[in-house]
Every structure is written in C-alpha cells, then in structure tokens.
Image (cartoon, rainbow, N blue to C red):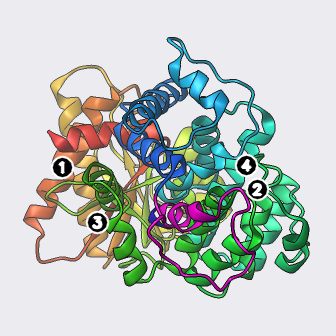
C-alpha cells in the first residue's frame, strides 16, 4: 500500500503534464505531497479491515462510509468534480464513472487476500460504490490482480499475459512509444495499461516510479498505480519508505501500520505460500479461498462418517485429490464423529489429508465436545505424522448446520488449548475461510 502512496506523492508535482517527460528528476521535492489518491487508498484499506461481515452489501456500505469520512477530513486533496458531488450527497449513488479513481485506491485489495477470485470480487466492490461503469470496474480489477500476481511469485511475462487475456488491455507498446503523445487523461482505459507498462519496464522499485513519472499525463495517479504493483514485486527501499512516512499525518500512519500488521505474511513450513496472521496472542493464521489449493503439509477434510466423499468441502477435496483418495478411504472403515483418520494427499499440493467427522448440530452439549475433539484429534494425528503446517475448514458449519459464531469459538478454543499443551512442537495452523465473512467471524471471536 505504501508503494501506491509513494507513487502518488512523487508523481503529484508533475500532474497535468507539468514534468519534462524524463526519468532524471529529483525524487523528493518540497511539493511531493499526498493527494486524493492517498486519502482514498487509506479509506479503502481501513474499510476492508473494519467491515463486520463478508456480505457484498456490507463491504460496499463500509467502503462508502470510510471514503466519505476520509474525504471530508481532507476536502482539498484534489478530488474530481463528480466525486465531490457524490461526497456531498445525502444518499450517494454510483455515477457510472470509468475514471482512474477506481484503480488508484485499490492497492490494499491486492495485498489482502490469498485467492485471486476473491481479490477480483473485492476490487469490483471497492470500485462500484462510485465507478460502476464496466471500464471503471475493470481498471480496479486489473490493478488489484497485478498486485496479487506480483506478490505471489508470478513473473512479469505471466502478469502481462494475464492482464492482456483477462482484461483486453493492450500492453504491446513500450514506454518510449507511449511517451511522446501521452497527455493528461483520467480514464482507466488510458491510465491503467500505461501504469502496468511502466511497471513491466522498470528494473527496480525506484526505476518503476521514475518510468511512470516520465510518461507524463495524470502523473500522480499513474505512478500511484504503478507503485502499488512495484511494491508487491520488488519491495520498497527503506530510505524511500522513511521519506514517505515523514510526509503522512499520524492518523494515516496508524491505518498503514495496522494494515501491514493485518497483512502479515509467513512462509514457514508452508512451501512459500503466504498466510496472514490473526492479531491474537497465539500463532493463528488464515487464508481466504479454496482449501484444496493450499500448499501446506496437510489439509483437514470435514468428512462424513463413510469417508467416501460428499458435498461441500468434502466433495471438493475428493475431486481435487483424485480417485486415489477414494480408494484409500475405502480401506479405513469409516470414522466416528469427533475422531480423525489420515490419508495421502494424492493430486493435492498437501502431502496429507486428515479426515474428521463433525457433529450435525442439534443444540445439545455433546455437539460442542464432538466439534472440539475434531480439532484436537486432528492436531494430535498431525503431530504423530511429523506434520508442521495444517489448514482447517470451518468444520460442521455447512450442511451440518452449526452456527458459525459458535463453531468459530469452539475451534479457536480447541486449537489454542492444543497449542498451549504442545508448546514444544512447531505447528503452523491455518484457518481456511471460504469467504471474507468467515474470516471476520474468526477475527471477532479471537478478539474476545
């Protein structure tokens, strides 16, 4: 996110074609200040951290409220005419914009999620509160997906190919070809492809920033977009980061610091897969997306008692693992509620699958004991097999009907108790959330 803010600051003195279209310029000058790009980047990041549930309407409402709050705090940051009208409306509605504002504010989305489909959906939601034109949505999604791909190990050629195929942007031109005729324009169509091209040609974080500024045009926004992608690919040199932080007010720095804590990444025992850490006293991590795609030692299957596959997570794991999993499960003679059995992972990235049978919810006290045992017995079995990273779905919360808040609390208690009793063993535990809402439920429970 700081990469986008840095791009905004460094590009702002040269907005409206005020630069000389060269990479040779002083990186920081007195007028290198944040604009509306930074204010709304902060607003979106805070909204996505504060949203109470993962429903589309809740995300949209929270983003809208946060943008109104921050824009009214900084009313002279350089907003567009249509946005100012939206901001002053009692009942603001999207106004069909395809301006580049949807792309300039979206960088936090690219860093927040570990699933590309969810990244695309969240990017669209942050755009549509104002920019509900298809091109406005596309600009936000292209920017967020480029950041996602850059931080998850894709090469520049892979990023370029994905953007061209998915969004139809022409990335065939070089910056030398763009530069001579490029001018100030504020549409996604004529900003996002140029920003991505600057990233693709840049040789380092600073070089991407200088390349973007050298194109001219709507320089703060173009460089903001390029800077967010460059951060994900290269990281940010400490001296540049330090200078940026000096120019941000404390209330913005508080959001930035909270965001980087929330977007905490680890690669320990997880085969270079990144996971975010919950803010809790215990080491508990989360992923939002498809558990079958996780590159961990073991994933847990919320199985039925036959172990022969079913719906939901169970069916998805069997489909992804292939027929070998079913054949091995046939030899296990089923599994009782609360117990756990282990198999190979077959076609999964995970080496093992631990199958546990959650209770069908009835409201009786034994439901809690059985669900708690699912987590404890799975973790015990994982330790017996020298497993050091394990991902759990939200057991029993699907067709078995366990209320999600109750189930999350039981899961958290069982896992943390196991961690306390096995403090001598290094185990990375990931809660795999099928959507943003489930992650927020876990987050709320862990705060308690």
Whole-angstrom CA distance, mark 1 to mark 4, is: 43 Å
Residue position for label 3 = 381
Residue position for label 1 = 414
Quarter of the figure with residue 378: bottom left
State which tag comes first along the sequence, 2 or 4.
4
Q: Nearer the viewer, residue 216 or 93?
A: 216
Q: Compared with residue 76, is residue 250 higher up or lower down, i.e. above or below?
A: below
The kind of secondary structure element at disc 4 is: helix
Is there a contact, CB below 8 Å, between mark 2 and mark 4?
yes
Residue beneath the point at 66% across and 75% down:
154
Q: Is residue 427 magenta?
A: no
> Of helix, strand and loop, which mostly describes the magenta segment?
loop
Circle 4: is it few (<14), some (14-19), or many (20+) Cα within 10 Å?
many
Name the mark on residue 191. 2
State which tag comes first along the sequence, 3 or 1.
3
State which tag comes first along the sequence, 1 or 2.
2
Q: Nearer the viewer, residue 227 or 33?
A: 33
Q: Compared with residue 14, is residue 86 higher up or lower down, i.e. above or below?
A: above
Name the mark on residue 139. 4
Circle 1: is it few (<14), some (14-19), or many (20+) Cα within 10 Å?
many
Whole-angstrom CA distance, mark 2 to mark 3, is: 53 Å
Q: Is residue 26 magenta?
A: yes
Residue beneath the point at 16% across and 26% down:
365
């Amino acid at each position: 996110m700081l990469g986008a803010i840095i791009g905004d600051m460094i590009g702002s003195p040269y907005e409206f074609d005020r630069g000389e279209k060269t990479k040779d310029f002083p990186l920081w000058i007195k007028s290198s200040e944040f604009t509306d790009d930074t204010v709304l980047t902060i607003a979106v990041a805070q909204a996505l951290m504060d949203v109470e549930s993962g429903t589309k309407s809740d995300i949209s409402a929270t983003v809208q409220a946060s943008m109104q709050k921050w824009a009214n705090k900084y009313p002279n940051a350089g907003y567009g005419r249509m946005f100012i009208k939206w901001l002053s409306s009692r009942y603001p509605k999207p106004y069909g914009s395809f301006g580049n504002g949807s792309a300039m504010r979206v960088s936090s989305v690219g860093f927040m999620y570990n699933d590309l489909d969810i990244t695309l959906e969240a990017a669209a939601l942050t755009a549509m509160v104002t920019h509900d034109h298809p091109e406005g949505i596309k600009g936000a999604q292209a920017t967020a997906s480029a950041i996602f791909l850059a931080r998850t190990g894709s090469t520049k050629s892979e990023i370029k190919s994905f953007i061209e195929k998915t969004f139809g942007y022409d990335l065939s031109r070089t910056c030398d070809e763009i530069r001579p005729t490029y001018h100030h324009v504020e549409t996604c169509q004529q900003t996002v492809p140029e920003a991505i091209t600057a990233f693709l040609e840049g040789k380092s974080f600073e070089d991407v920033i200088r390349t973007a500024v050298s194109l001219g045009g709507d320089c703060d926004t173009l460089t903001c977009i390029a800077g967010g992608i460059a951060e994900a690919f290269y990281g940010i040199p400490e001296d540049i980061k330090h200078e940026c932080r000096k120019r941000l007010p404390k209330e913005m720095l508080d959001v930035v610091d909270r965001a980087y804590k929330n977007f905490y990444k680890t690669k320990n025992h997880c085969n270079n897969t990144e996971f975010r850490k919950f803010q809790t006293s215990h080491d508990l991590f989360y992923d939002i997306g498809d558990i079958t795609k996780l590159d961990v030692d073991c994933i847990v299957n919320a199985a039925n008692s036959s172990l022969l596959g079913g719906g939901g997570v169970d069916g998805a794991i069997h489909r992804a693992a292939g027929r070998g999993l079913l054949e091995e499960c046939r030899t296990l003679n089923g599994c009782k509620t609360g117990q756990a059995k282990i198999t190979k992972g077959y076609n999964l990235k995970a080496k093992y699958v631990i199958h546990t049978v959650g209770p069908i919810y009835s409201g009786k006290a034994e439901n809690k004991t059985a669900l708690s045992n699912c987590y404890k017995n799975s973790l015990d079995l994982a330790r017996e097999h020298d497993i050091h990273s394990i991902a759990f779905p939200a057991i029993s919360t699907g067709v078995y009907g366990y209320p999600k808040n109750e189930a999350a609390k039981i899961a958290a208690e069982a896992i943390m108790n196991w961690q306390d009793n096995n403090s001598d063993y290094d185990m990375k535990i990931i809660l795999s959330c099928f959507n943003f809402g489930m992650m927020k439920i876990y987050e709320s429970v862990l705060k308690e």
